[in-house]
Image (spheres, rainbow, N blue to C red):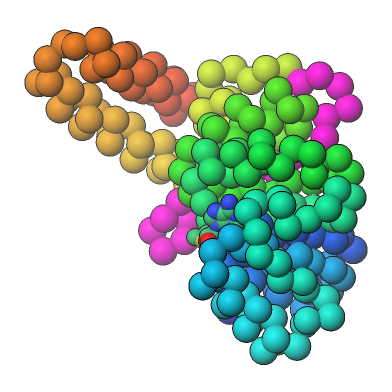
Amino acid sequence: HLSDRLHAVASFIPKGSTMADIGSDHAYLPCFVVKQGIVQKAIAGEVVEGPFLSAKKQVEEDQLSDFIDVRKGNGLAVMEPGEVDVITIAGMGGPLIAQILEDGKNKLPGVKRLILQPNINAISIRDWLVPNEWKVIDEQILMEDGKIYEIIVAEPADQPITPYSPAERLLGPVLLNNRSNVFKEKWQQEYQQWERILNELQEAGNIERIKEKKKELEEKMTIVKEALKWKN
Ligand code: SAM
């Protein structure tokens, strides 16, 4: 049984694609999409020995070794340029996903779609995508077991991308436009947490670093307050 989260990631993979799943852990996602007939050839990349061995074991158990290549290596180092149509990177923090893309830039020509599922700080990914000329074509937000996940789908831009507004950067251009209930829930939670932090900082004096942190929080809170006020 595949998690709703990985199901949602899979739903963005066009049928007939070749894919690389980076940080694949048990290789659940490549195994699922190959069994479903969505993908014919997949690479499962892992940098850590334990998860790498789990991925190998899973692929062998599912008798998918002819279709899924489990490779050990850091980020996109496991693939050659032009080898896959789609790259999925799921279940990590946004900054790590952005770093993997940045470090693997030379592998990206020929890739038609990135499907990225940050657990936190999706903003880091949007901030990487825009200057690197990847356009967000879709986004999804979902809740599973009380946790909220975002998915960002990007394709190479055929023209320069208009920079996102502060709200689009933080909240996601598509998610902001849809303002689903899960979206509202997520940002209410974040807002409340920032409020708590801000209260704690009020008592922490006024050194420069704290002033900056406060300002950053207040800016984010203003963005979220505005976004949640809008009517659907
Ligand atoms: N993608 C799976 C999912 O969404 O369920 C697994 C997520 S798991 C929390 C993150 C995995 O990414 C770990 O197995 C970790 O070893 C791997 N990872 C972290 N940094 C990596 C990197 N630079 N290159 C490849 N794999 C990495």
Which quarter of the image is occupied by the N terminus? bottom right
Q: Left or right of 173: which side holds 132?
A: right
Q: What's the residue at 81%, 19% (across, down)?
A: 160
Question: Would you say the magenta stretch is mainly helix, strand or loop?
Answer: strand
Q: Is 154 inside the magenta-drawn segment?
A: yes
Position of residue 2 measured from the top left corner of the image (x, y, whole percent): 59, 73
Vertical position of residue 7 compared to residue 150: above or below = below
Question: Which of 130/56 is in front?
Answer: 56
Q: From this view, report whether residue 213 is shown above or below residue 101.
A: above
Residue in the image at 78% along x and 55% along y? 79
Task: Place residue 39 in its image quadrant.
Answer: bottom right
Q: Residue at x 65, y 59 (%)?
A: 73
In the image, what residue occupies the spot 76% across and 21% down? Answer: 161
How many marks can you see? 0
Give the x, y percent position of residue 71: 70, 67
Magenta includes 36?
A: no
Image height of 184 relative to 15, above or below: above
Image quarter for ligand 1 equals bottom right
User: Looking at the image, can residue 85 be seen?
Assistant: no
Q: Is residue 124 above or below residue 23?
A: above
Q: Say left or right for 150 vs 210.
A: right
Q: Position of residue 188 (x, y in %)?
A: 36, 36
Q: In this rendering, does residue 45 appear at all?
A: yes
Q: Please state the horizontal and vertical placement of residue 107, each as a whole percent of the image.
A: 80, 44
Q: Quadrant of residue 25?
A: bottom right
Q: Quadrant of the C terminus?
A: top right
Q: Which residues are magenta?
A: 142-161
Pick whichever, 189 or 10, lies toward us: 10
